[in-house]
Structures are given as structure tokens and as C-alpha cells.
Image (cartoon, helix red, strand yellow):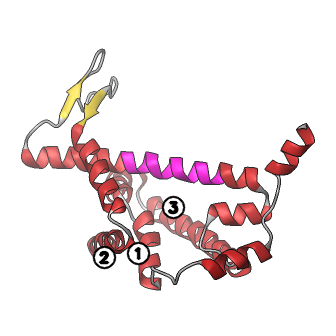
Amino acid sequence: MTMRVVRHLCRRKTLAEFESEKAGEEGAQLSLFDLLCIGIGGTVGSGVFVLTGSVYPVAGPSAALCWMLGGLVCLLSALSYCEMSTRVPSSGSTYAFSYHALGELAAVAGATSLTLEYGLSGAGVARSWSAKFADLIGASLFASYSGGSARGSQDNDNYLDFGAAGMQLVCVVIILCGVSLSKRVVNLMTVAKVGLV
């Protein structure tokens, strides 16, 4: 019984299975420009704008060297994904590649980790945007709860951020509206961010 479970968790998907799934898929809904905007938009986020201003006064010229080293690491990662996507013809990313190379358990672990990463980073970006929006309109969008302190305190951050929750809700609604609307929003935001940089 235990060996059957282990074999099931370590089961790999063959290239023939990927080919048969690809034959049943509809045509691509995302163009090369759309995919580039998703990748660049995920890389050039709020952190670039926030961290750049706070790091340069402390780190000086070494900050630029760190940015270049980080860019090189991102380039190597992108080239690795390019090679894997040519070998495994699938529209999936981490899940599909791990399923083929390492097995189902590694694929589920990788996909779960990636989903958690996007969820946590999205929450951080929403909190950042909410704080900027609250400062812009001069109103408080926060509510402290039992044992919590007001926003901006160094002690803790036990407060509800209604602006961030609203931002997350707007993102969910955009995604639920489908690929055509969400890719337009992502493309617009990415072009705006790159224009600012």
C-alpha cells in the first residue's frame, strides 16, 4: 500500500501525454507582447520604486552593482525556462515542467509555493498602494483591532487595511472577467511602470 502511494506521488507525465493534451487545447490567447508584459510586470513591481529610494542613500554605488547581479540571475532563470519550454511543449509552467522532470509531488509542491508567493507579494503591493492612496486623499483606511496599533507604528501592524482588501478584490474581479480584460489591464500597467522607470 505504501509503495503504491509513493509510486503515485512520484509518477511523471511523459512527453506523449503533453502532446496529446496540446492537441486538444484551443489556440493561444496570449501574444508574445502579452507574455512579455506579464513577465516584466511581475519583475518591475512596487518594490523597485520603494526600495530604490531607500537603498541608494545607504548602499551608494554598490546598489547598482546588486541590481546588475540580480538582473543577471533573472536572465539565467529566463534562459532556463526557455530551454525547458522548448523541450516540454506545454502551456503550464512550474507545474508542468516539474511534473515531467521530477514527478507529481514535486509539481504540486512547486505550484503551491508559486501560488503562495504570488498571494503574499500581491498582499504586500496592495498594502503599499493602500498606504499611498490614504496619504493622497488624507483619510484613514485602517482599523486597529484588539491589541493592535495604528498604521505606521514600529511595534506591530495588527490592523485591518480596507484599502488593501479593496485592491485585492478589484484584482480578483478583473481576473474573473476573463483573459481578454486582464491582459489589457496587465499590459497597460506594465507599459506605465516601464515608462516611469
Q: Which residue is mark 2?
A: 191
Magenta range is 110-123
Question: Which comes sooner in the sequence, label 3 or label 1?
Answer: 1
- In the image, what residue type sits under mark 3? Cys
Q: Residue at x 54, y 64 (%)?
A: 70
Please say if 65 is above or below 131.
below
Q: Is residue 68 magenta?
A: no
Q: Which residue is mark 3?
A: 66
Horizontally, residue 25 falls left or right of residue 182, namely right
**Residue 88 can be seen, yes or no:** no
Q: Nearer the viewer, residue 182 or 158?
A: 182
Magenta region, main secondary structure: helix
Which element carries disc 2, helix, strand or loop?
helix
**Residue 107 can be seen, yes or no:** yes
Are dots 2 and 1 in contact, CB under 8 Å? yes
Q: Residue at x 30, y 44 (%)?
A: 127
* Front label number (2 vs 3): 2
Distance of mark 2 from mark 3, alpha carbons?
A: 24 Å
**What is the x, y in percent for residue 41?**
40, 68
Horizontally, residue 4 falls left or right of residue 113, namely right
- In the image, what residue type sits under mark 2? Val
Horizontally, residue 13 falls left or right of residue 82, namely right
